[in-house]
Image (spheres, helix red, strand yellow):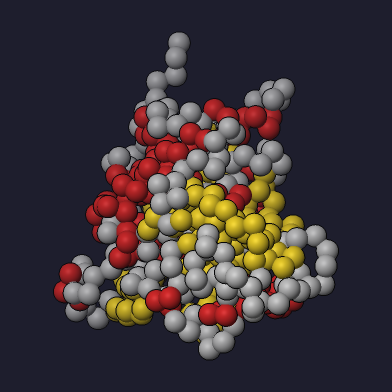
Amino acid sequence: MEDQHEPPKRVVVCGGGVIGVCTAYFLAKKGAAVTLIEKSSIACAASGKAGGFLALDWCDGGPLSSLARASFDLHCSLARELNGPQSYGYRALDTLSLSITESEPAHGRKPSSKLPSWVDGPSGNARPIGTTETTAQVHPQLFTRALLSKATSLYGVEVVIGKLERVEVEEGRVRAVALEDREVVKADAVVLALGPWTSKLSLLSSLFRVYGLKAHSIVLEPKEPDAITPHALFLSYYSAQGGKPMDPEVYPRPTELKRVQHWELRRVRQGTTSLILVYGALSKDREAWPGAGHPCFGLVIELIGEVYICGLSAEAEVPDDPPQVVPNPESIRVLKRVAKTVSSHFGEGERVIAEQACFLPCTDDSAPVIGEVPGVKGCYVATGHNCWGILNGPATGAAVAELVVDGRASLVDLTPFSPARFSRGRKW
Ligand SMILES: Cc1cc2nc3c(=O)[nH]c(=O)nc-3n(C[C@H](O)[C@H](O)[C@H](O)COP(=O)(O)OP(=O)(O)OC[C@H]3O[C@@H](n4cnc5c(N)ncnc54)[C@H](O)[C@@H]3O)c2cc1C
């Protein structure tokens, strides 16, 4: 007889990166009572430090194709719902591939007509690889925080700042999660979205491996932000020191985007209180904020007109706490050299806003792991999104919400991502 699927009432989502937040949002929208548990702060890791580049068809021909296409479309509809262009810099943009040779003189060359005028460094082989129909971007930290803000204010998602210690299982079914401070949060279903920290949980590390690739990025405020047009650049960068070319990426972010910080005091289960920081959709009107004027709320608006440059990744040990992830100074120096070589706008009078590192969550077969954990009813995992987690967050979240609430995902076929693929031949 087929197992009857009973929709869970209380769902705990662990991990406040883009995957956990998207999952919490879509679960709550489908009527589940959701608690999101994050050990540090929302979008503190890769989901806050990524490029935020989105592509419709770059995953075509591989297992991610339908997930990526569905997610590109969902980003578009979420941007309408959440005022994405203003609140988190959602916009379509053109994308170019080009080579840059550091040792060649920048001046005295005829600029390529295929390149925007701010790309005035020693470049060659420029060609379009994406158009405003097929490529877009978001500011990933603002996106994640805006979505969570909507999930808390509209659908009642509760946020707890605390570290998941273990999942409590009885008779093969999930019952609760235990936090480091011994708080136990009861749950009918649990979704584990721990990114590169997945393998620190023995329940999952006994089934498959998620390892971290440490990647670096810098964020600059160019001297004339308005001169930087919406063009993403994928480079083959030939350093003056020789060696294999590097492949840094350059993403300008819109100048009209404003960062809004919104503090909110939120009561969490069992009578304890914790102060959390939620970033919400943009509004110049202070009164539009729920709770405006309350002493526990604050608002800061800051104008953004920045350029994000990333690259230089290598496998490395993932430290326990996200704030312990610090960049390697040599990698930052190289990225600053890349910036100066690509454009004179990034080499004089610019301000460095961030020098940072974070971890891509990677699996042994390069595909994400999304589905129910074999042998533990009601326990789900969503991780291993590698370099496409910002793109694939919405469709992952929506499909996991369907799987948890309805018993099957209809938006995307999740079979290729099932965690069971790592345990073929095992008896559960
Ligand atoms: C340099 C760089 C550039 C990138 N650019 C892009 C891009 O342009 N487009 C794109 O689509 N993708 C991009 N990515 C990939 C994308 O950032 C990741 O795939 C995505 O952010 C992963 O999201 P996540 O939620 O799985 O993990 P994370 O963002 O790492 O979040 C995991 C969260 O879980 C929390 N956590 C961990 N353990 C616990 C615990 N025990 N209890 C409670 N909480 C816990 C952590 O604190 C963290 O907040 C980029 C990545 C990097 C590194």
Residue at 32% from the left image edge and 50% from the top image edge? 78
Asked whether residue 116 appears in the rendered view, the answer is yes
Relative placement, left or right, of 345 versus 330 is left
Quadrant of image for the N terminus: top left
Residue 168, position in %: x, y?
54, 44
Residue 272, position in %: x, y?
38, 66
Residue 147, position in %: x, y?
35, 57
Observer-nearest of 134 and 68? 134
Quadrant of image for the C terminus: top right
Relative placement, left or right, of 60 versus 211 is left
Asked whether residue 41 appears in the rendered view, the answer is no
Observer-nearest of 106 and 179? 106
- Classify residue 267 by image quadrant: bottom left
Residue at 37% from the left image edge and 58% from the top image edge? 91
The relative height of residue 240 versus residue 392 in the rendered view (above or below) is below
Residue 210, position in %: x, y?
67, 47
Residue at 43% from the left image edge and 76% from the top image edge? 227
